Amino acid sequence: MGRGVEWAVHSCVNMAWTPPGEPVNSARLAEFYKLPAAYLNKQFQSLVRAGVLESVSGPHGGFLLARRPENISVLDIVLALEGQDPAFRCEAILGNVPDPVRQDNFARTCLISQTMRQAELAWRQALARQSIAGIADSMERRFPSDKGKVLDYLAAE
Amino acid sequence: MGRGVEWAVHSCVNMAWTPPGEPVNSARLAEFYKLPAAYLNKQFQSLVRAGVLESVSGPHGGFLLARRPENISVLDIVLALEGQDPAFRCEAILGNVPDPVRQDNFARTCLISQTMRQAELAWRQALARQSIAGIADSMERRFPSDKGKVLDYLAAE
DNA sequence: GCTACCCTACTCGGATATGGAATGTCCGAGTATGCTCGG
DNA sequence: CCGAGCATACTCGGACATTCCATATCCGAGTAGGGTAGC
């Protein structure tokens, strides 16, 4: 899994903390986390294409959540950055056996593929249950000072 | 996820079908599935290191299951090939914030990391539930001719 | 005829190339801000 | 003094390098089996 996922989730939590409608400066955020600014920007672009974020150009521009934080799940972010395809792709190698008797939609009947899909489904469901709003709330409750620190840093200068 | 996983699971199912104690020729298996022989061999080596398979050198050599098929899960194979580390590694970027107040075991308290670990745990549990023996049985029940075809092909020549 | 030895062929094992994706960087397009100049 | 126009700085967006890992391949180490020579 790409590193950008962690960055993106943290960033989205921070965007959930900032007042709605107010963009967050990407470079400032990267500076806060000591991350490569241009690369973080690249990740955000993927999120914009996926409809998770919106972008504002020009001075005082930046990125902001495209939906309410309650309606953005961790899964949305992961899929936006890692791609929609499941991690396990069934090549249906049994279709390559000398006797190619049932090549058609083998993936549906392949028990191995079924197992993998079932596992990935459980994984996605676990990620879909967690929303950005939920993480933001829990984090605020557990580390009350964080929200203020972030907002101060982003507002300063 | 690497392609070798699918090959390995199929191969282990075939090894569960062959009489216990009898090695399976790696090159022959690769030929059956139209796979690159040397690369399949490499995957098997990882499985040997992980204690899933055993190897026999020399003529009539090959690979065989190191344990009974009931005691080999799909998860064992996946972890052997993909590595034990979880897909999501928490870099604890919050430890990089200007005020590094709690760098120690941040991963344990990081809510994002918790979410990811929980999802991966669900994934692993789903894979751990499926044993090679179970897949072999189900496959034999659904595609009764497969077992015979495989054994014939491996025995011929 | 039997046995011990050697030779060969075969298979695993690790070291070695290659390609493509993830990672990281840079410059152009577009826009809001603030200044300037004219009315 | 006020407003329109313009220059400017700032930010996103996509195009361009680089690094690393999955993929693929090859040759050496070790072993079982058979053949051969000697007893």
Image (cartoon, coloured by chain):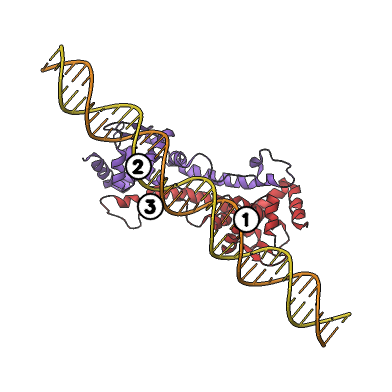
Chain colours: A red, B purple, C orange, D yellow
Say which element carries label 1: helix
- Measured along the vertical axis of the image, is residue A130 above or below residue B58? below
State the image quarter where residue D9 is shown: bottom right
- What is the CA distance from the residue labelled 1 to the residue labelled 2? 40 Å
Judged from the image, the secondary structure of the residue bearing numbered disc 2 is helix
Q: Neighbour class for label 2 at 10 Å: few (<14), some, many (≥20)? A: few
Evaluate whether residue A84 shows in this view: yes
Looking at the rendered structure, whether the residues under marks 3 and 1 are on a common chain is answered as: yes
The chain containing the residue under callout 1 comes to A
- Circles 1 and 2, Cβ within 8 Å, touching? The answer is no
The CA span between labels 3 and 1 is 33 Å
Numbered disc in front, either 3 or 2: 2
Q: Position of residue A127 (x, y in %)?
A: 57, 51
Chain identifier of the residue bearing label 2 in the image: B
Q: Upstream in the sequence, badge 3 or badge 1?
A: 1
Q: Residues within 10 Å of mark 3 (few under 14, many from 20)?
A: some
Name the residue rendered at 30%, 42% in the picture: B29
- Looking at the picture, does residue B51 appear above or below residue A43? above
Tell me the tag on residue B38.
2
Q: Amino acid at mark 2?
A: Ala
- Quadrant that contains the C terminus of chain B: top left
Left or right for B16, reference A134: left
Tell me where residue B124 appears, x and y as whole percent: 50, 43
Going by the numbered disc 3, the residue's amino acid type is Glu
Residue under label 1: A40
